[in-house]
Amino acid sequence: MIEFRSDTFTLPTPEMRAAIASAPVGDDCYGEDPTVNRLERLAASVLGKEASCLMPSGTMANLAALLAHCPRGTSVLVGAEADIFVYQAAGAAVCGGLGYVAVPNLPDGTLDQAALEEAFPEDPHDPQFALPGVVCVENTQNRCGGVVLPPGYLPALSAFAADRGVPLHLDGARIFNAAVASGAPVASLVADADSVQFCLSKGLGAPIGSMVAGSAPFVERVRRVRKMLGGGMRQAGLIAAAGIVALTDGVARLGEDHATARRLAAGLGALDGVTVTPPQTNIVLFTVPDERWSVPEFVHAAAAAGISLGGFGHGRLRMVTHSGTTPDDVDQAVDAIARLLK
C-alpha cells in the first residue's frame, strides 16, 4: 500500500529514534523535563515568539489557544473550510462554551472580508449578540488545497482584529510548508498573529506533538488549559526529543515533498477526465468523472489497487506527499489510477 492519505503517516527517522532513546527527561508537569524545555525555547525562537508550550496534538493545541483567548459566551470567527471548524469536533463549544461563526474562505485561503465584518455586531453593547472573542485563520489552508496565504494578508487581518479589540490566532499546522513554498522566514509569516500553533507530526515527521506559541502570559494560560484538558505529561522529553530533530532537520527537506506533489499533479492532470488543482505545497486535490465514480467508490477501488488516498469534500479527492513518498511511488500511483479510469 502506498500511503497518500496524509503527511501524518510519516515515520520517525533513525535520528529521531536515537534522540528519543538518549533524551534526558524529568516531570514536565513540574516544568522539570530538560528536553521539553529545550524544545519550547527552540520553537519560540524559531517563530520569533516569547514562549511556547508542547501539546499532545494540533487539535488540543488549537483548542487550548481558543480557550486561553476567549471568555465563555463569546464566539470564534473562523473560516468555513478551516480545520478548527470542520475537523476538530466542535471542541471550543463543548469544552469552552464558545460559539462558532463560520466565514467563507476564498480560494486563496483568505477570509471573505465582507462576511468577516458582518460577524461583528453593529452595537457591541447590545446583550442579544455574542461578542467575537478571537479571529482564526489557517496557513497553509488545507481544504483550499494547501495554499499559502498571500503576502501582506496576515498583517492586514491582524490590524483589522486589533482595531476591534480581538486577538488573532493562526492555525499554522503546516506553517513550515508555507515558509518553504514562499521563501519567507517562518517568523515573518507568524509575526502578526497573537498566537500560533504548528504540528511537529505532519511534514516535519515527528511521531507526536504540536506547539502553541505567543506571549509569555498567554502561554501560561495555555498551560493551565492543557492541564484541564488532560494534556499534562510527565517524562515528555521522549516526545520532545523527536520534535527537536523535526525542527532542526525536517524543515529543509519539505521542498522535496512539494516537488513530489507537483510531479503527482502533472501525472494526474494528464489523465482523461481528471481535473487537478495545481499544488502550492504538498497537497494535491483532484476530481474524477462523477458519472462513473462516487468519491467513496473511487477511494475503495484505489485502495484495492494499492493506493491509499482520501475523499475531501465537494466531490474532491486528496493525495498528500511526505517524507515517505518517493517519485517511484508517485509514478506507480498515477499508473494505478490510470488503469482504474480505463
Image (tube, rainbow, N blue to C red):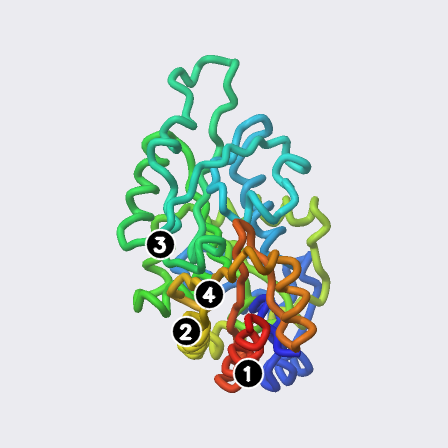
Indicate which disc residue 270 carries. Answer: 2
Ranked by sequence position, the earlier of labels 4 and 1 is: 4
Instruction: Answer with mark 2 or mark 3, whichever residue precedes in sequence.
Output: 3
In the picture, which quadrant includes the C terminus? bottom right
Q: Determine whether the residue tagged by mark 3 lies in a helix, strand or loop.
A: loop
Q: Nearer the viewer, mark 4 or mark 1?
A: 4
As measured in the structure, the alpha-carbon distance from the residue carrying label 4 to the one carrying label 1 is: 17 Å
Callout 2 amino acid? Ala
Q: Secondary structure at mark 4?
A: loop
Q: CA distance from mark 1 to mark 3?
A: 32 Å
Residue corresponding to mark 4: 274
Q: CA distance from mark 4 to mark 2?
A: 8 Å
Distance from Cα at disc 2 to Cα at disc 1: 14 Å
Extreme-left residue of the structure = 152
Dot label at residue 332:
1
Name the residue that disc number 3 marks. 149
Nearest the eye: 156 or 303: 303
C-alpha separation, residue under disc 4 versus residue under disc 3: 26 Å
Question: Of marks 2 and 1, which one's residue comes earlier in the chain?
Answer: 2
Residue 249 seen by the camera? yes
Neighbours of disc 1 within 10 Å: few (<14), some (14-19), many (20+)? some
| Image-quadrant location for residue 68 | top right
Determine the residue positioned at 27% across, 51% down. 152
Of callouts 4 and 3, the N-terminal one:
3
10 Å neighbourhood of mark 4: few (<14), some, or many (≥20)?
some
Identify the amino acid type marked 1.
Gln
Residue 129, horizontal then vertical, whole percent:
50, 18
Which residue is at a point 63% across and 64% down the rendered structure image? Answer: 299
Q: Which residue is rendered at x = 45% and y = 45% of the image? A: 169
